[in-house]
Amino acid sequence: MKILPRLKIGKLQPKYPLMQGGMAIRVSTGKLAGAVAREGGIGLIAGSGMGLDELRNEIAIARSFANGGIVGINTMVAASGFRAIMETAAKAGIDVMIAGAGFSRDIFDIGREYDIPVVPIVSSDRVAVLSEKLGASAVVVEGCEAGGHLGTDRLARDIFPEVRAAVQIPVLLAGGVIDQHDIVEAFSTTKADGVQVGTRFAASFEANVDKAFHEVYLNSKKGDVFRIMSPVGLWGNALSTPFSDKAERGEMKPPSCNSCLKKCSRCFCIIQALIEARGGNLDKGLVFAGEHVYRINEILSVKDIFNMFFSGLDYLD
Ligand SMILES: Cc1cc2nc3c(=O)[nH]c(=O)nc-3n(C[C@H](O)[C@H](O)[C@H](O)COP(=O)(O)O)c2cc1C
C-alpha cells in the first residue's frame, strides 16, 4: 500500500516518517533513542531530570546504537534546567530539538545558533502558527489521548486539520498510534506528515524501565488511563498505582526539594514519582501512559515494532 509520506524536518530526512516521543524521566534514554534511529525513525532522548554529564553520555550511547540515524533531545519546558540541557545537547551535536510540556521561545535561539531544527509540541493552531513564525521546522500535534503531560482536552485527530490548514511546515500527529492500522489511518485519513509515538515504545525492550512498569502496561484494560493534575499545572495521562491513588486522595506530603521545576504546586514531586515508576517502585511511582495502552499485549523490540508498523507499506512517490 502506497501511503507513506517522505518526512523532512529541516535538513533531516528519516527513512520512516516516525519520531519516537521523548519520555521522562529516563524512560527514553540513549538505548531506545539509538535503536529507533537505527531502524530509520527519529529517536529522542528525554533530557528532563538528567545531569549534564549524564546527558552527554546518553547522547554518546544513542550514537553508538544509531548507525548514523537521527537522534534528538526532548526536554520539558517546565524544567528549571531546560536551557542548559538544550544547550548541552546542541554542543554535543544533537540532530533535532523538541520542547515538551509547555512552550519555549529560548529553544528557537539555540536552534538558530547551532543550526539545529526545532520542533515544538502544540495543541492548537494558534501555537502552531507562532512556532512557524519563530522558525520551527515542524510541529507535533499532541492530543488528550497521548501519554504524559497534556496541553489540551481535545483529541489529536480533531485538532490536526486546524493545524494542517494554518501552517506550511510538516505536521506530525501524536497520540494513540499503537499498531499498523493506526499508522495507515494517520497517513491515509488524517494525512499527517509523520507520527510521534510514545506508549508503544515505552512498551519495548529498549525502554529503560523495570519489569513492574511494563506489567502495569500489560495488565491495563480499556478506560484504565485517568487524568492526574501534575504539580507542573498540567493534566497528565497515567495508569493507577498505589502512589497515584494516594495522590488523587490528596494524601501526599509536600516534598522538600531543590526547585527543579520553574513552577510547581509541590502537591507531590512529579520528577521523583516518575523516577520511582521507571524503577518499578509502584508504591511511590506514577506510570504515565497513553489512553490506548490497553491495546498493547506484549513487549516488543524496537526492530519488531518497526516491522509491525511498516511492513507492506510503501512511499507515496
Ligand atoms: C512514559 C511517558 C513519558 C512521557 N514523557 C514525556 C516527556 O518527558 N516530554 C514530552 O514532551 N512528552 C512526553 N510524553 C509524551 C510522548 O512523547 C508522546 O508525545 C506521546 O506518548 C504520544 O502519545 P502515545 O503515548 O499515545 O503514543 C511521555 C509519554 C509517556 C508514555
Image: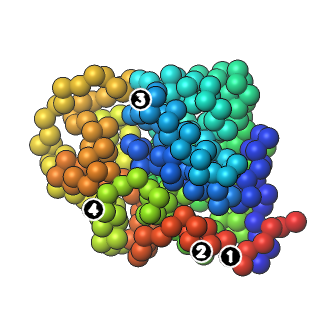
Mark linked to residue 311 = 1
- Label 3 to label 2: alpha-carbon separation: 35 Å
Left of 14 or right of it: where is 21? left
Q: Residues within 10 Å of mark 3 (few under 14, many from 20)?
A: few
Mark linked to residue 51 = 3
Place of residue 36 in the rendered image (x, y in percent of width and height, measured from the top left): 59, 56
- Label 4 to label 3: alpha-carbon separation: 25 Å
- Label 1 to label 3: alpha-carbon separation: 38 Å
Residue that badge 2 annotates: 308
Whether disc 1's CB lies below 8 Å from ligand 1 is answered no
Q: Are marks 2 and 1 in contact (CB under 8 Å)?
A: yes
Left of 10 or right of it: where is 140? left
Dot 1 amino acid type? Ser
Residue at image position (76%, 44%) is 12
Dot 3 amino acid type? Gly
Above or below residue 219? Residue 76 is: above
- Which of discs 3 and 2 lies nearer the camera? The answer is 3
Quadrant containing the N terminus in the rendered view: bottom right
